[in-house]
Image: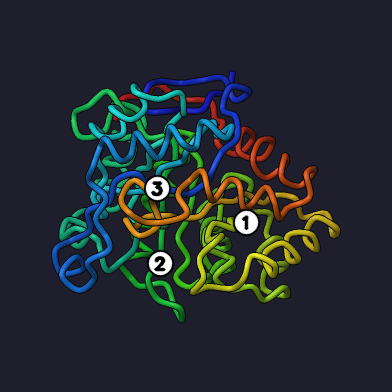
Amino acid sequence: MTAIRTVLGDIAPDDLGVTLCHEHLFTNPPRWARERDHDMVLDKVDAAIGEVADFNSLGGGALIEMTTEDYGRNAAGLLAVAEASRVHVVSASGYQKGIYYPDTVATESVDEISRRFVTDVTVGIDGTSARAGVIKFGTCRTDEIREDERKVQEAVARAHLSTGAPISTHCQAGTLGTLQANGFADLGVDPARVLIGHLDRNLDYGYLREVAQTGVWLGFDHWTKPKYPSDELRVSCIEQLFAEGYTQVMVSGDLGRPSYQPHHGGSPGFAGLLKQIRERLPAEIAETVFLTNPREFFAFTPTETAA
Ligand SMILES: [Zn+2]
């Protein structure tokens, strides 16, 4: 029996509902990053509950919360939001990307790093009852995967192979998707268990097709952001992918800043995001990317091996 691992426990895939595949309810990056950019910290439980309630009122069912330990993951906060709402919340293990890694990445072995991820998935995060339902991997450069990131990629692959939890990635400015995909394949990971994220920062159709041909899932997770490629271009790329049979696509907004969330004084929020994507995508494609695909991709057969 497969299940989707939410912070409140495992659920049947059919119960997941309309899902945003890459979001943030809480963030708290390292101090050097916060000092450089004052729009990075999400730390208000009440505001997060408000955002999620608005999303639910428009039919939203689940958020995959992709904040990792090195970016200020808040397991207690996620539990509070999930308990106060009717939206499923899935939390992430793994790390964000090289520039945010904790010092332990340099000193620990691949096995030691992997064991941290396995503990998040099988035991709980930071001593709470919340378990992670996805493992994150990210790259911070646009030209190559850093040495320390290769080490973490191996640890992520191992944790995935031992727990079954799917892998979701961060591609800096949408680049290196093929490299990430091939790297996981070389480490023995089935491409169908990997979601390559932020590809819509880099809407070159030839590149998208190349990534799709590896068999991974494609994350179009930067909708509604004026500083990036337009939603019209997103829609035309998704339609072309579907027309060619590449339907392993999921959507989100990656709204990980106060300025993106109404309860923190920003816009559009998860509700506004859901509304705008629905208005733009043909109904049949919307159903696939919001509902059918997430419940397939995020489901796994949990192994109960303790770390
Ligand atoms: Zn993100």
Q: Provide the secondary structure element on which disc 3 rests.
A: loop
> Which residue shows up at 73% across the image and 75% down it?
206
- The amino acid sitting under disc 3 is Met
Which element carries disc 2, helix, strand or loop?
strand
Closer-to-camera residue (147/263): 263
Q: Quadrant of ligand 1?
A: bottom left
Q: Check disc 3: other Cα within 10 Å, few if <14, some if 14-19, many if 20+.
A: many
Residue at 67% in and 73% down? 207
Q: Which numbered disc, 2 or 1, marks the residue closer to the eye?
A: 1
Which of the numbered marks, if any, corresponds to residue 66?
3
From the image, which quarter does the C terminus lie in? top left
* Percent coordinates x, y for residue 75 in the rendering: 26, 35
Q: Which residue is mark 1?
A: 218
Mark 2 → mark 3, Cα distance in angstroms: 14 Å
Does 259 sit left or right of 222 as displayed? left
Amino acid marked by disc 1: Leu
Q: CA distance from mark 2 to mark 1?
A: 16 Å
Q: Quadrant of the N terminus?
A: top right
Q: Is residue 41 above or below residue 237?
A: above
Q: Residue at the spot x=69%, y=60% of the render?
A: 212
Is ligand 1 less than 8 Å from the beta carbon at label 3?
yes
Q: Could you tell which of marks 2 and 3 lies nearer the N-terminus?
A: 3
Callout 2 crowding tier (Cα within 10 Å): few <14, some 14–19, many ≥20: many
Residue 213 visible at all: no
Find residue 73 and report its horizontal and vertical position in percent. Answer: 26, 45
Which of the numbered marks, if any, corresponds to residue 255? none
Label located before the other in sequence (2 or 1): 2
> In the structure shown, which secondary structural element does the residue marked by tag 1 occupy?
strand
Q: Please name the residue that numbered disc 2 is placed on.
A: 139
